[in-house]
Amino acid sequence: RGLPITAHDLTLSKPFLPRGERRTSSGPCMASAEMAARTPPLDAAPSRSRSSSAAARSEFKAVLHLDRSPAWVALRIYHVWCILVGLSITVLVVVEGFLSLYVALFQSPWVEGTQAAPLNLAAACLLSVLLLSVGSSLCHAGVLLVRDASRVDGFLVFRALILGDAVNSRLGLPAAAAERQSSSSRRRCDLLVQVFGIYLPLDVIPVMASMICGGPAQWLAWVAWMSLLEIFVFWLLVCVNDYVSKVKA
């Protein structure tokens, strides 16, 4: 009726709240603030995982700082030379196998003039194709091992194959290198593989054999045999990895 509105009228216009219940917010800003306070941080776990992965990458980069050491560079060059020696022996063994097969092909019992059995010729051809396939695959494995020995992280693929990791045949790299470096147990296994699978056959055994037998010739012979053994083991592991990958695919 035209009367002025007093503060008493405003207090009477407020909604009635039951006893024991209090107002939790005075507006949309307070409500959003309280909801944000009650909501747990969803990015806490991802942040911890990101921090752990960053720590693993920093540790992996710290390992890669070995490429600045002259001793480590010299050891890599020595390992590359050892695998090159083994690759040369592998090529010579394959060529010797081909020559032996071709010499035997024109001798008894493969071929005896015009009375040779057709099955003997077929068997000789199949044996030649098999030797060509195995020999080329073995030489290719030797070339891959030379490349693997020249990496900053020496014999990365060879160690991954020994540990049972899957290796991408197209890229020539293990599929789980970062995960292996981030796990302490896998790092210990990797260290054991380096000691007993690489450094002991290529570095320790030839030196010990030359000291026992005497003479640098024995050292060179043992280096050649150990390098040939490394190439053969690497070739077997590559064949197993290819077979397992094809079965899983």
Image: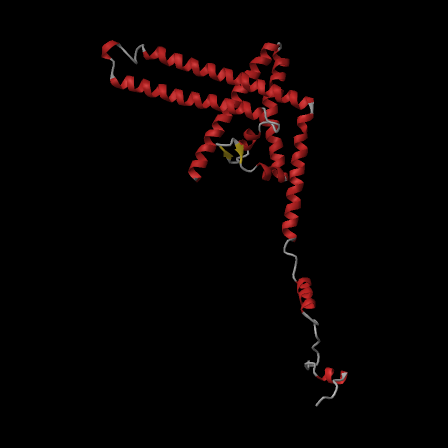
Q: How many marks?
A: 0
> Can you tell which quarter of the image residue 188 is in?
top right
Question: Between 32 and 199, which is closer to the camera in this rendering?
Answer: 32
Residue at the far left: name it. Answer: 115
Farthest-out residue, right: 7
Query: Seen from this angle, which residue lies furthest bottom?
Result: 1
Q: Position of residue 40 (x, y in %)?
A: 65, 59
Coloration of the structure image: secondary structure
Which quarter of the image is occupied by the N terminus?
bottom right
Q: Is residue 174 left or right of residue 117?
A: right
Camera-nearest residue between 59 and 220: 59
Pinpoint residue 72: horizontal percent, then vertical percent: 66, 24
| Residue name at image x 51 percent, y 22 percent | 143
- For the C terminus, the quadrant is top left
Asked if residue 4 lies left or right of residue 214, the reply is: right
Q: Is residue 160 left or right of residue 130?
A: right
Q: Residue at x 58, y 12 (%)?
A: 218
Q: Quadrant of residue 97?
A: top left
Quarter residue 24 falls in:
bottom right
| Location of residue 96 in the rendering, given as x and y in whole percent from the top left corner | 43, 13
Tell me: residue 213, above or below residue 52: above
What residue sits 47% from the left and 21% below the top? 139
Q: Residue at x 69, y 24 (%)?
A: 69
| Closer to us: 12 or 212 | 12
Q: Position of residue 226 (x, y in %)?
A: 55, 19
In the rendered view, would you say 118 is above or below 191?
A: above
